[in-house]
Image: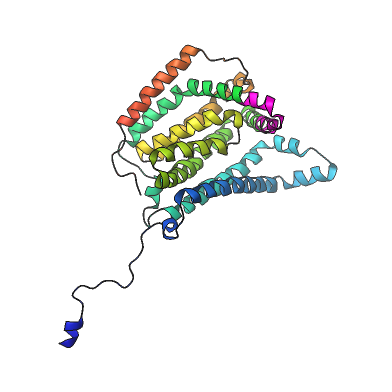
Amino acid sequence: MSEQLNTPTSSIPEYEEDLRPWVERNGFAHWAIAVLWFIIAFFLFQIIGGLIGALLLLPELMQAVQSGGDIQAIISANLDIAFIGNTAGQFLIIGLASYYVAKLHSIPGKHRQFLRLQLSPNVWKITAITAILVVVIMPFNGFLGWLNYLIFDSLVQVFPSLNWFVETQDSMSEMIKGFIGTENAVLLAFIHIGIVPSLFEEVMFRGYIQRALEKSWGIMAGILISGILFGMYHIQPSNLIPLSVLGILFAYITYVSNSLIPAMVAHLINNGGQVLYGSMNKEFLEMEMTRELDISPLIIIASMILSAGLIYLLRANKNKEAQHV
């Protein structure tokens, strides 16, 4: 009888599981871990991709070193292998590693929802609107690229040391154009330049980084800052503005759809479309940015108006389920 009197009427577990994300349990800020991973992933991606490419080309590179040959020429002659290294880095670091790092920020059992790796109501309707929007916005984004070129070209005149970025960007651009223009390489180019980034970069930027920033600073900051980081990631100062605008657009599409699928499709249309168009129109690959605007102002204005209308349509179809995980 005395034992019954001394027993609590309601039992409280001695240890209650803390379901907060690892980041919060350990006193870190979501944004700080995400930005730290952005920096680490950028360098790891370059290192891993470069090492894998170098290993695949090891016999040719060793022979070039011994004979004093041109290493850059070997890489240019084996762009398919160089792109395999790049794709491996994208998969291992940008995609797979980011997928697991995101677990530090998510509630146990809600990892895929945190990354928005899911179907959602209206997702296919939003994807269809997005596919049209990506094509419609191209002239306006081309105009932004022209403005970006003017700004950066003026900066290079004042600060000649910035010319290093121009040379690096031109070298990368020539490699990509050479690969796209190679006979029978269209499918490989479409895979490496179109499909691979549309999957793995979306997991990192719109899946992980955007969501982590949203948890620290809210929806608007998550959209804007993740988009700017996306632009910076490509190391193309003369294309920073149009790349950032695309990143912001993809981030907004991800938010309104609550799914990565529309942004993945948008990314694929943008990258893959340029590969296919360039392969069919060689003069497109030879085009270079100049101080002369080669897009009709009427087309730019029409692009802006139509894009604004489609963005409004996306907002009208925004999924209403909870966005916070």
Residue 284 coordinates in the image, percent (x, y)? 59, 20
Residue lying at the far front of the rendered structure = 158
- 311 part of magenta stretch: no
Residue 181 falls left or right of residue 190: right
- Tell me which corner region of the image, top left, top right, bottom left or bottom right, holds residue 266: top left
User: In this view of the protein, which residue sits in the foreground, 252 or 260?
Assistant: 252
Q: Residue at x 74, y 37 (%)?
A: 72
User: In this view of the protein, which residue sits in the foreground, 192 or 296?
Assistant: 296
Q: Is residue 113 above or below residue 18?
A: above
User: In this view of the protein, which residue sits in the foreground, 166 or 218?
Assistant: 218
Residue lying at the far bottom of the rendered structure = 2
Residue 48 coordinates in the image, percent (x, y)? 62, 49
Q: Residue at x 36, y 22 (%)?
A: 309
- Tell me which corner region of the image, top left, top right, bottom left or bottom right, holds residue 322: top left
State the quadrant of the N terminus. Answer: bottom left
Residue 152 falls left or right of residue 252: right
- 161 part of magenta stretch: yes
Residue 6 coordinates in the image, percent (x, y)? 20, 82
Residue 251 falls left or right of residue 314: right
Q: What span is colored magenta in the figure? A: 152-171
Residue 183 visible somewhere in the drawing: no
Residue 324 coordinates in the image, percent (x, y)? 34, 47
Residue lying at the far right of the rendered structure = 67
Q: Residue at x 56, y 28 (%)?
A: 275
User: In this view of the protein, which residue sits in the foreground, 51 or 45?
Assistant: 45
